[in-house]
């Protein structure tokens, strides 16, 4: 698993998408951003944004999925434990079939960084050279601390397709 805490990679990826100016089906890279607000009992609500990208920037131009995960800030005077667990599962898919995935638990990082300044970028590569139908997709499974409920799931909206 590769975890990179660097905003410059995301900026470079987004600049590459803007510079292409081609349709999503033919793009070498494409992204979609999704956000969610989590209702935390007795604490300020927490927001999270995930930017999913799929590109042909892997080794030898093979498909690669990335997820840039950021969260909003909260009152540092309150208890920092917001989540018992919050796991991001990133998938590189072809025609809605997973061809590679990774999962990462974020609770300790998210509970510890009250300023929202620690973005995480996850990468999934594949050895496939097949063309067409590639996308990045993600699912977030979370358990909010002190809410008395079972874990829940957020199905993040996937990226548009690339060839």
Image (tube, rainbow, N blue to C red):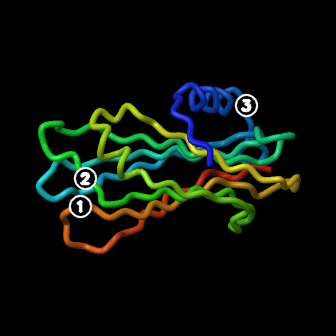
Q: Residue at x 82, y 40 (%)?
A: 59
Q: Which mark is residue 145?
A: 1
The CA distance from mark 3 to mark 2 is 40 Å
Q: Residue at x 69, y 65 (%)?
A: 98
Do the residues under discs 3 and 2 have CB atoms within 8 angstroms? no
Q: Tell me the element at label 2.
A: loop
Residue denoted by label 3:
20
Q: Residue at x 19, y 66 (%)?
A: 147
Is residue 12 found left or right of 113 in the rendered image? right
Is residue 8 found left or right of 110 in the rendered image? right
Query: Is 74 or 17 nearer to us in this picture?
Result: 74
Q: Position of residue 50 (x, y in %)?
A: 48, 46
Depicted 137 relative to depicted 80: above or below:
below
Q: Position of residue 163 (x, y in %)?
A: 80, 50
Between circles 3 and 2, the one closer to the viewer is 2
Indicate which disc, 3 or 2, sits on the residue closer to the N terminus: 3
Do the residues under discs 1 and 2 have CB atoms within 8 angstroms? yes
Is residue 91 found left or right of 80 in the rendered image? right
Residue denoted by label 2:
82
Quadrant in which residue 135 is drawn:
bottom right
């Amino acid at each position: 698993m590769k975890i990179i805490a660097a905003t410059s990679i995301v900026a470079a990826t987004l600049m590459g998408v803007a510079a292409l100016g081609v349709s999503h089906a033919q793009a070498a890279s494409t992204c979609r951003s999704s956000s969610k607000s989590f209702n935390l009992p007795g604490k300020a609500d927490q927001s999270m944004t995930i930017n999913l990208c799929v590109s042909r920037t892997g080794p030898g131009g093979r498909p690669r999925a990335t997820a840039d995960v950021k969260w909003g800030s909260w009152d540092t005077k309150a208890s920092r434990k917001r989540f018992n667990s919050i796991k991001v599962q990133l998938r590189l898919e072809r025609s809605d079939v997973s061809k590679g995935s990774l999962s990462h638990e974020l609770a300790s990082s998210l509970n510890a960084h009250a300023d929202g300044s620690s973005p995480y970028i996850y990468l999934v590569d594949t050895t496939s050279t097949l063309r067409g139908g590639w996308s990045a997709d993600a699912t977030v499974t979370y358990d909010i601390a002190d809410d008395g409920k079972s874990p829940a799931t957020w199905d993040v909206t996937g990226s548009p397709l690339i060839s």
